């Protein structure tokens, strides 16, 4: 039995999950063979799915794809953008083939990673004319400051670790998906947030917030490409991967 059904849901059984894994591996192998046959004609054709945040799409992906397109015009890129906190999971589950994401503290098994850039994680706050500015006078009383944090992901893990190391319990005003949303809410005066500096630099609201000088500083955001190691057998994926390596 591959599925368990009730009146509302259909879920895979353990046998179903094993068959799904087998089917995906078979399709990957067929795609690798097909591309190798194409290579004999000195051309690569096909499609690669790439997932990243909106910020990553114009901070990193533009230059990457411009160089890749010049070298491999027959490979089509299918780009999806969204919440970076789900990026690695989308690759692990086969929804996407390549993603740009921050490297977590514990590397996921079966994944290859190639660093692109490093960006500090910074605390951001509303400008001095905000009603919240009274609470932002040093020394900061973190127990009373409303925090706007990512629902999950690398930045949330680092913030949780930071507060634990300081023996503090944050007052969480809101948990949101996407770093861009954090900048928006902070600019409106709802609280203090934590975002990668590269997100702030590329935000149209960068001049509506201030960066707080907080010690100790949070660890930097290590951004790069993730792909399933077994996917590197595909000539298409390998071509994309090697092109990044030689930049």
Image (cartoon, rainbow, N blue to C red):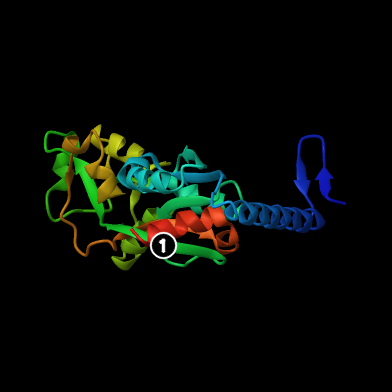
**In-front residue for pair 234/81:** 234
129 relative to 233 in the view: left or right: left
Q: Provide residue 14's location: percent of width, then percent of height.
A: 78, 58
Q: Provide residue 132's location: percent of width, then percent of height.
A: 19, 39
Res. 139 image quadrant? bottom left
Q: Provide residue 207's location: percent of width, then percent of height.
A: 16, 36
Q: Provide residue 196's location: percent of width, then percent of height.
A: 29, 51
Q: Which residue is denoted by mark 1 in the rendering?
A: 114
Please name the residue shown 56% across and 56% down the image: 235
Q: Please tell me whether residue 63 is drawn above or below residue 233 in the rendered image.
A: above
Q: Residue furthest front?
A: 41
How many marks overall? Answer: 1
154 relative to 134 in the view: left or right: right
Q: For the residue carrying disc 1, how many other residues have a C-alpha within 10 Å: few (<14), some (14-19), or many (20+)?
A: some
Note whether residue 200 is visible: yes
**In-front residue for pair 44/104:** 44
Please name the residue shown 42% across and 51% down the image: 100
Note whether residue 145 is visible: no
Placement of the C terminus among the 4 image quadrants: bottom left
**In-front residue for pair 141/244:** 244
Please name the residue shown 48% across and 39% down the image: 79
208 relative to 9 in the view: left or right: left
Secondary structure beneath label 1: strand
Please name the residue shown 40% across and 43% down the image: 53
**In-front residue for pair 47/3:** 47
Res. 115 image quadrant? bottom left
């Amino acid at each position: 039995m591959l599925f368990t059904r009730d009146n509302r849901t259909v879920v895979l059984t353990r046998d179903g999950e094993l068959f799904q894994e087998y089917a995906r591996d078979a399709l990957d192998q067929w795609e690798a063979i097909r591309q190798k046959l194409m290579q004999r004609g000195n051309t690569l054709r096909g499609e690669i799915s790439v997932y990243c945040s909106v910020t990553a799409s114009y901070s990193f992906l533009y230059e990457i794809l411009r160089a890749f397109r010049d070298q491999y015009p027959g490979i089509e890129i299918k780009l999806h953008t969204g919440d970076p906190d789900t990026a690695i999971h989308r690759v692990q589950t086969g929804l996407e083939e390549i993603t740009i994401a921050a490297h977590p503290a514990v590397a996921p098994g079966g994944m290859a990673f190639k660093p692109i850039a490093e960006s500090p994680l910074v605390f951001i706050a509303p400008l001095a004319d905000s009603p919240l500015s009274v609470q932002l006078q040093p020394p900061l009383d973190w127990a009373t400051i409303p925090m706007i944090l990512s629902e999950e992901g690398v930045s949330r893990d680092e913030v949780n670790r930071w507060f634990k190391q300081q023996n503090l319990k944050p007052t969480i005003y809101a948990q949101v998906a996407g770093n861009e949303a954090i900048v928006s809410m902070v600019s409106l005066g709802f609280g203090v947030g934590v975002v990668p500096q590269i997100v702030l630099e590329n935000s149209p609201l960068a001049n509506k917030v201030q960066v707080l000088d907080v010690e100790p500083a949070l660890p930097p955001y290590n951004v790069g490409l993730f792909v399933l190691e077994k996917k590197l057998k595909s000539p298409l994926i390998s071509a994309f991967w090697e092109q990044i390596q030689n930049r």
